Amino acid sequence: MDPAGLIPAADSIPIAAGWFRLLLSASFILHLLAMNVMLGGAMIALAQAVKGAGQQGALSPEHAIAAKLPFTIALTVNLGVPPLLFLQVLYGNLLYTSAVVMAAWWLSIFLLAMAAYYAAYVYDFKFAVLGWVRTLVIGLAVLCLLVVAFVFSNSMTLMLKPPAWTAYFGNPHGTHWNLAEPTLWPRYLHFVLASLAVGGLGLAGLGSWRRRRGDTGGKELVRVGLDWFIWGTLAQMAAGLWFLLSLPQEIMLLFLGGSGPHTALLWLGVAMGVSALVLASKSRVPLALAATMATVVLMALTRDLLRSAYLKPFFDPESLTVTGQASPALVFLAALIVGSILIFWLLRLAVGAGKES
Ligand code: HEM
C-alpha cells in the first residue's frame, strides 16, 4: 500500500500558508510557556509535598505553587486552542487522520485536563486542611497532566508518519499508542524535563518579584526555583541530545550542518539555553528568564522545521490552494488585537487584585 494514499485531500486556505505558519508558531510558543510553568510547577509542588508532606507553611514554595496552579491550567488550556485551530488549517488532513487512529486517547485529553483542574482547585482551596492527603491530590493532578502531554507527543509524532497509520487496520478501536516511533520517548522526556526547568524558573521569577516587594518568603522561592531550573536544564539537555540522535539520519544531518537554517536555529537555541544556565547559576533571575524565553522561541521554530522535514515526502502546506479571500483574515486580525488588549487589561486587574490581597 502507498502510504501517501491514506492522506485525505486537503482543503483550500484563504491566505498564503506562511501567515498560518507564523500564527501557529506564535500561539504554540504561548501554549508551551504556559504548559511548562503549569506542568513544571505541579511536579515541583509534588516533590515538595513528598519531602515534607503535610508540614509546609503558608510561605512555602509548595503553597506559592498551589495558589497559582489553577490559573496556569486555565491559561494552558485556553492557549492550546489557537495552535489547534491553526494546525487544523494547515495540517488538518494529517492531524485528523492520525487522531482517529488514537481517538480514545485524544478524547480523553479533555477529561484528564478537567480532572487535573479539579484536583488543582481542591489542592489550592483546601491546602491547609488536607494534611498528608495533599500529596495524593497534587499527585493525581501531575499524573493527569503527564498523560495529557504523552497523548500530545503520540499524536504529534503519529501525524508526521502516514505509513504508521496502517496500525488502524490492526486496531480500529482508537486505542493505538505510537510506541514504535523511536523519537517518542526522548521527545516526551525533552518536554517534561523542560517543564521542570521552566517551572523552576517561573517559581524563581515569582520569588524575585516578591522579594522586591519586601515579602519574606521570596528568597526561599528563588533558591528552590533556581535549583530546579539548573538541574532540570542539565537533564533536559541530555534528553535533547537523545532526541537529536533518535531522528532519522537524513533529518538529523540537516541539524548538523546539512542545512543552514536548521543548524543555525537549533544551535542558537542550545547556546541560549546554556546562557540561561550560566545566568541562573549567578542568580540573575530576570536575565535568565529572558534567555529562557528566547530558547523556547528558537526551539519551537526548530520543531516547526523538523515537522516540515518529516512531511517533505508526503505533504507541503505551501502546495495548498489559496483562494485569496483576505476579509476573514482581516476580521480575525481585528478580533485578535481587541482580544489581546482586553486580556492584557484583565491580567493587570488580576495582578492588582493579588497585590491588594
Ligand atoms: C492541560 C494539559 C496540556 C498539556 C500537559 C499539554 C502538553 C503539550 C505538549 C507536551 C505538546 C507538545 C507535544 C509534542 O510535540 O510532542 C503540546 C502540543 C500541543 N497542544 Fe497541548 N497540552 C495541554 C493542553 C492542551 C489543550 C487543552 C489543547 C487544545 C485545546 C492543546 C493543544 C495543543 C496543540 C494544538 C499542540 C501542537 C501544536 C503544534 O504542533 O504546533 N493542548 N501540548
Image (cartoon, rainbow, N blue to C red):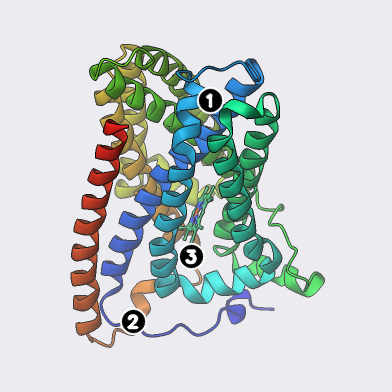
Residue that label 2 marks: 13
Q: Nearer the viewer, residue 311 or 93?
A: 93
Residue that label 3 marks: 311
| Residue name at image x 50 percent, y 85 percent | 9
- Amino acid under disc 1: Ala
> Residue 180, image x and y in percent?
71, 53
Q: Nearer the viewer, residue 69 or 265?
A: 69
Left or right of 13 in this view: 102: right
Can you see residue 52?
yes
* Between marks 3 and 2 in the image, the one whose residue lies nearer the viewer: 2
- Amino acid under disc 3: Leu
Q: Earlier in the sequence, mark 1 or mark 2?
A: 2
Residue 235 tag number = 1
Looking at this view, name the residue that lies furthest to the right. 170
Give the Cα separation between the discs numbered 1 and 3: 29 Å
Q: Nearer the viewer, residue 317 or 1?
A: 317
Label 3–label 2 contact, CB within 8 A: no
Q: Earlier in the sequence, mark 1 or mark 3?
A: 1
Give the Cα separation between the discs numbered 3 and 2: 19 Å
- Report the quarter where the N terminus lies: bottom right
How many marks the image carries: the answer is: 3
Label 1–label 3 contact, CB within 8 A: no
Instruction: Estimate how packed mark 3 is, as few (under 14), some (14 to 19) or many (20 or more) residues with alpha carbons within 10 Å.
Output: some
Q: Secondary structure at mark 1?
A: helix
> Residue 156, image x and y in percent?
54, 58
> Residue 80, image x and y in percent?
44, 57
